[in-house]
Amino acid sequence: MDCVWKECAFDELSVAELYAILTLRARVFVVEQKCLYLDTDGLDPGARHLWAERGGEVVAYVRILPAGSKYAEVAISRVITAAEVRRTGIGRELMKRGLAAAGDVPIRIGAQLYLEAFYESFGFRRASEPYDEDGIPHIEMTRAATSSGT
């Protein structure tokens, strides 16, 4: 898939980039998944933002939160792909790039339960019992640092 990948801190985002990211998040999480919640949760300003654009449109996105902001560990959250690019491998590429951007540190995610095997393929392991978040079953998953000494 022919995409342009970008990564930056919140204060480096252009207004147009931020708008496109928030549009994709609303399109999938609020409209498609019918989750009525405040997506702008106050964590974006401290996050690194990683996304893919195709034809000038954001089609995949993830944010990396520093340790202590959401969980004790670094968090990867708001993992999202646009419906039109699902099953193309872009989600796998997004996670590979997100993990690289996070670094070799312990990571925790809140994953939709049906994606457990997907995240396990990246070394994540279940760390909680299933719980309901906005009407969708979720679990917390953790991934240890991969190198010794961290």
Image (cartoon, rainbow, N blue to C red):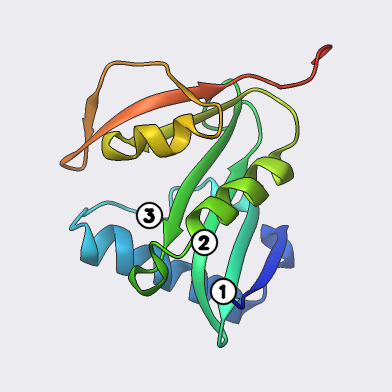
CA separation in Å, label 3 and label 2:
23 Å
- Give the residue at mark 1: 1
Q: Secondary structure at mark 3?
A: loop
Give yes or no for contact between labels 3 and 1 (Cβ–Cβ under 8 Å).
Answer: no
- Residue 90: assigned label: 2
Residue contact between numbered discs 1 and 2, judged by CB atoms under 8 Å? yes
Q: Quadrant of the N terminus?
A: bottom right
Q: Which of the two discs, 3 and 1, labels the residue nearer the N terminus?
A: 1
Label 1: how many Cα within 10 Å (few below 14, some 14–19, many 20+): few
Task: Please identify, in this view, whether the residue under mark 3 or under mark 2 is nearer the observer.
Answer: 2
The quarter of the displayed image where residue 94 is located: bottom right
Amino acid type shown at disc 3:
Asp
Marks 1 and 2 sit apart, C-alpha to C-alpha, by: 8 Å
- Secondary structure, mark 2, is helix
Taking the image as shown, residue 129 lies to the left or right of residue 73, namely left
Q: Residue 47, can we see it?
A: no
The location of residue 35, given as percent across then percent down, is 21, 53
Q: Is residue 3 left or right of residue 82?
A: right
Callout 3 environment at 10 Å: few (<14), some (14 to 19), or many (20+)? some
